[in-house]
Amino acid sequence: MTQTIRVNLDARSYDVHVGAGLLARAGELIAPFAPTGRVFIVTDQNVARHHRAALVASLDAAGLTNWTITLAPGEGSKSFEGLELLSRHLLQAGINRKDLIIAFGGGVIGDLAGLTAGLIKRGVDFVQIPTTLLAQVDSSVGGKTAIDTPEGKNLVGLINQPKLVIADPSLLTTLPERERRAGYAEIVKLGLISDAAFFQWCEQNAPAIIAGEAEPLTHAIAKAIAFKAGVVERDETEQGERALLNLGHTFAHALEGHAGYDGALLHGEAVAAGMSLAFQLSAALGLCSEADAKRVRTHLTQAGFITDLRQLPGAPYDPDRLMQLAAADKKAQAGKLTFILARAIGRAFIEPDTPADVVRELLHIETRS
Ligand code: NAD
Ligand code: GLY
């Protein structure tokens, strides 16, 4: 069964279709957005190996002429080099202003192809067919696109909304379990932000979601997308509420920056550790109970995440370097540290002036061997 969630953004509104088997219908769903009948698939080698043939068959059946540009997998493609490579491939393949780009991959492909679509020929429409759990529940919806630079993650980008998102959970069966777990971090995040009952549901269903069981997986994907769509509708350009989606991300971006972007520490793994730290910080500041912080950490550990920074891939972490990276995060304003903190599970809020000494002390304690 297909569920359709509308993201209402005036002229930039679009549908997100969620359902097992939707890839076979991609051509028919995409055709209305391809006025020239010409589409350019941007993907990576892993996705192409497993799923390109099915996508091409569906596009062919709908009469859409298609080209495929296959990039190297991994965060390294989300770079100025990746942007140049993709742009030049598209130009050499003869892309025109009214053609359509299909971002067919995880968050790396979605972020890079979405940014390139916004820039090339001053803007070509694009659709998202996310193939990782993280991309289905988070990165394909909401229009954030970016590349990384040596100065930090996602620092060069655009808000560029897709014309359509097709989330087919059956594509996730070929995804390594570690990647499904990383995506789960962005699902449980929504419970921690604003829905204690959903967090409780996650406590019961995490193993089935991470194992890729169709029913709880599809339920969680649709729930996460509906939640995100609502936030994006109310605050597309992150003037306020949308920043709540960054729960755990200031810590996560610092951990990822410290570890390097070589795949040793996945984004979702960093987010899980970051969310645990955010609740510990909230408890240290007397905002939430120690019991809630412990419950969050226990759940994430039981779901298979490492929340102990001394054991996390990339360890040992230098707390002073983590502080520097947190301060350089794009959410930091005028030397103040912005964190998403919580008064309880399901009651997160934005704190733009977090006391740096408490953050520093927490990081010193958590990284001490
Ligand atoms: P990814 O795109 O690197 O994909 C993870 C790995 O899985 C890659 O090796 C890929 O080749 C492989 N893969 C993808 N789909 C597959 C499939 N169906 N079967 C087998 N292998 C498959 O990583 P990701 O976790 O999807 O995305 C991480 C990126 O997303 C980060 O750069 C992060 O900053 C970004 N992100 C963006 C947003 C946003 O709002 N734009 C939100 C969250 C994260
Ligand atoms: N992933 C956070 C956002 O889209 O705002």
Image: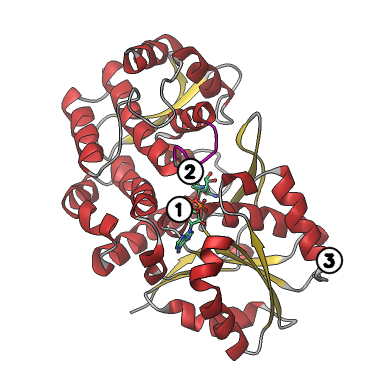
User: Is residue 329 placed above or below 5 in the rendered structure?
Assistant: above
Name which quarter of the figure residue 69 lies in: bottom right
Q: Is residue 196 magenta?
A: no
Q: Amino acid at mark 2?
A: Arg
Q: Earlier in the sequence, mark 3 or mark 2?
A: 3
Can you tell which mark lies on residue 269?
none
Q: CA distance from mark 1 to mark 2?
A: 12 Å
Q: Amino acid at mark 3?
A: Gln
| Disc 2 Cβ-to-ligand 2 distance below 8 Å | yes
Can you tell which mark lies on residue 242?
2
Q: Earlier in the sequence, mark 1 or mark 2?
A: 1
Tell me the magenta residue range: 260-265
Q: Position of residue 181 (x, y in %)?
A: 33, 49
Q: Is residue 29 left or right of residue 191?
A: right
| Disc 1 Cβ-to-ligand 1 distance below 8 Å | yes
Q: Main secondary structure of the magenta part?
A: loop
Q: Position of residue 303 (x, y in %)?
A: 24, 44
Question: Dot 1 lies on which element?
Answer: helix
State the residue position of label 3: 92
What is the crowding at mark 2: few (fewer than 14 residues within 10 Å), some, or many (at least 20)?
some
Residue at horizontal 24%, vertical 63%? 216
Residue at horizontal 24%, vertical 32%? 297
